[in-house]
Structure formats: structure tokens, C-alpha cells
Amino acid sequence: MDPYLHQQSGTPPPFLTKSMEASAAEKAPVTASGGARRVLLFPLPFQGHLNPMLQLADVLHARGLRVTVFHAAFNAPDRVAGYHFVPVGAGVPTADLVPTGSNADFAGALLRINERLQGPFEDSLREVLQEEEDHEGARPACLVLDSNLRSMQVVADRLGVPTLVLRTGGAACLVAYMAFPALCDKGLLPPQDHSQLNLPLDDLPPLRLQDMVFSTTTPHETMTTCLERIVESAKCSSGVILNTFNDLEGVELRKIIDGVGVPVYAIGPLYKISSGVKSSLLSSDQTCLDWLDKQEAKSVLFVSFGSLASMDQEELVETAWGLANSRMPFLWVIRPDAVHGSGNVGLPDGFEEETQGTGMVVSWAPQQDVLGHQAIGGFWTHNGWNSTLESICEGVPMICRPHFADQMINARYVEEVWKVGFELEGKLERGNIERGIRKLLCEEGGEMRRRADDLKDKATRCIKKGGSSQTMVDLLVNCIMSLPSSISMGLV
């Protein structure tokens, strides 16, 4: 049996259960006025972070908690009935807060978001706390915030609001972030020589040094500060929530528990537990689902590189002809801003005629619905965590093309730990692309698909009653409900 997978599928392991014993305290009563406790949430204003937070909100709301969602005014999520939404930072400069393209300085943008939203958030939080005390005679139970929003956590701490941290990435990613300072101390980061990049990291198997180079454009000091704050947010919280499940990342979850010193709640896959709440900053083309209905089972390659990654025009052309030459059905998502420095996408001459009847191109797709469709046989992905997790949970093997941040770590695990895909390495070239597609859909994909189906079954079991993720949700709710409801601190 693979040592990375827990021996008892779907059930909570002893080490996780033990770490949560303190969370299973008797639930606190409702507020003094008889109303339900309120939980506050603050997601990071990017597509891949908004949905997991809203899905978590849905899970908590279904357990009887009232929900208030703080959000950056410049990237507002879709409204959900029954939730209270509070915009933060209206009027702040935003031009450098929304990075675009694979080479953007995402870590720098995260630090700027924290700096510019901290003051406005404090004002908004004070107002919400006062309203809750006036109407319910109690403070909100806690603030659940994205782990990238450390400055908002500092504000909550100052105002006496307990915090929980949501990690929207995988457990392996957080383990790597925790190990980053030690690699710097050893002189491995930043890499001094290109020849070092393929160096295996003995303390972080199966990672290699190149997987820890999260950006080629961000200064090392900026990246170090950003990662330090992410780890601090976990250690300074009342608990860490992860959108993963024990049968997928049990070894990594154990390392996190040992490293952060607070309860850890692995409650994923969140999109399977929630009732379908989702938010999209981009408009999905639903007609692709009708097109998929007409395709044979497990015959179509889904191609999507997420909401932020980009390519140059040459890479676009090579990708197009690689897809066409494979002669395999495909559904290709190309955002209008997918090409560096261009507001529109120009497909090569002859491509549409060559692929008529076998391929479909859309500007955005309802990814969860697509991956869950019986026609999908493979996923060519950038390996953002949401995409990776959704592909695993739908039993879809992957071609990996990571770009930045945690994507290299996710791709490494897909290929070497879970063995449900492989990385398409080197320059994007049509012949290499064609071979990769055939490898996944026609040649070696069968074994990868069987392993993906096995993980899909384990994901399904973990969210059923008595499964590891449902048990963790129970413990998380118990933790939230047991937090003090009395007004112990004034709003100074």
C-alpha cells in the first residue's frame, strides 16, 4: 500500500482525532437574545480563494450559524441569500493588487492587499461587532480568514475576536512553506546555481529544489516575508482548516499538526460537502456542457490553465496545433487575457477548420460540472489546488503544466505520490503536446485512471457520515460553538 495514504480509508486517523479533543467541548448556547451564533469570514479576493471560503460558509450556515462575509470591494463575490456581505476598502488604489499573468509578482500583491485593507477592515469589523452586541448581546463566534490575510488577523486579535485560518491550498504546500526558512538557512534558497534546481529535498519528499522556487520575478525577501506571514497566521489562530482529506494527505497533515501547535481540520473536498454555492469572477459558457453530452464517455481532454496563468502567442499556437494533431476531442478554455500583453486571443489560421467537430473553445467553463461529466477522460491543468483536488475527486487523470506558487508542488504530488498524471516538461511544442495527450488518453492513462478512481472513491467515503472529513466538520463546528459568547472586551 502506498505509504502516503492512510490505512483506513475514509475514517479519521487517531492522530487527527487526538489533536481535536479540545475542540469537542459542549456546544455553547445561542446568543443572549436567542439568536444563532454568527461567524465572520474574509476570503482573499482571487477566484481560487473565493469559492472555498464561500463553500465553507455554506457548510457552517447549514449547521445553524449565521454568516457575515467581508470581501475586498474591488473583487466582490456573487451574493448568497441569507448571508451578510460587507465590502472592505472601497476607493483604495487597486491597479497593483490584482496581478495578471504567470510572471506577475503575486507575493508582492498579497503584501500590498494586507497593507491597504487593514485599516478599512478594522473600521468595518468594529461596526459589525457593535451591531452584533447591540442586537444579540454577544460577539460573533470567530473570524475565519484566508491564511494570506495575516494583517486582518492582527486586527481581529486586537479587538478580541478569535480567528480560524482557511488554507485554500493543499497540506503539502503548507508543509513546504513551513520548511522554507530552514532551506534558506542551509543556503539552498534562493538557488545559487541552475544545476541545483533538480536537487531532491530529503526532508520534503518527493519535492525538488525547483518546486520551492514559487516565482521567478518576486524578490527573495518579499517571498520570505509572504511565506512567514502565512505560517504565522496558522500558528496564531485557534485552528487551521484545510480543503483536503486524510486519505489524500495524511502524512502531510501529521506534519502540520506537529508544526503549528493548534487544531487542524481537514474537511475537504469542500465543493462536495457544500450545497453547490460558488462564485465566479468570470462568466462561464454553459453551452460546453451540451457539447459534452454528445461526446463518448471518457474521450474528451479538458484544457484549462486557471484564472491567472498566461502564455505567449507562440505557446498558444503550439498548444492549438498540438491539440489538433492529436485527433482527440478537446474542450479548451482560453481566457481573453490568456496571452501576455494582449486583450484578445487569436487562434492560428486553419485551426478551427482542422478541429471542427472534434474540439470546442470557450472563454471560461463551469469547471466542476465539466470535470464531473462522463465525457471527460483527462485534464490538462496548471495544477492550482482547486483544479488538482477537483480532478482527483472526479477520478480524472492529469497532464500537468504548473506555472507558479504551489502549482509545482501539486504537480509533483500528482506524478510521484498519487500517480494520477504526469508533467509535460520542457518548452511547449506541438509534437510534445500531441505525444502527451495520446499518452494520457490512449496509452498509459489506464493505470492513472484506475488510481484516480480509487482516490475518487476515498474522497466520496470521507464526506459521508462517519468519514474523516465529516468528523472534522463536526469538531470544527463544536470548536466554533464553544468559543466565548460574552462581551469580554470593549471596542477601544
Image: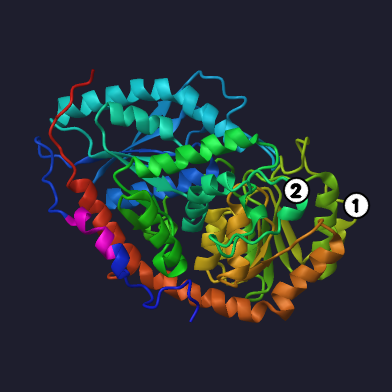
Quadrant (top left, top right, bottom left, bottom right) of the C terminus: top left
At label 2, counting other C-alpha atoms closer than 10 Å, the crowd grade (few under 14, some 14-19, many 20 or more) is: few
Going by the numbered disc 2, the residue's amino acid type is: Asp
Whole-percent x, y for residue 78 in the image: 46, 39
| 10 Å crowding of disc 1: few (<14), some (14-19), many (20+) | few
Numbered label attached to residue 349: 1
Q: CB of mark 1 within 8 Å of CB of mark 2?
A: no
Q: Give whichever of discs 1 and 2 has the lower sequence position.
A: 2
Q: Residue at x 76, y 50 (%)?
A: 194
Residue 193 visible in the picture: yes
Compare residues 232 and 305 and report the one nearer the observer. 232
Q: Circle 2 is placed at which residue position?
A: 193
For the residue labelled by badge 1, is the local secondary structure a helix, a strand or a loop?
loop
Q: CA distance from mark 1 to mark 2?
A: 41 Å
On the image, the x and y values in percent for residue 341 come to 78, 35
Highlighted magenta segment, given as a residue range: 17-24
Residue lying farthest to the right in this orientation? 349
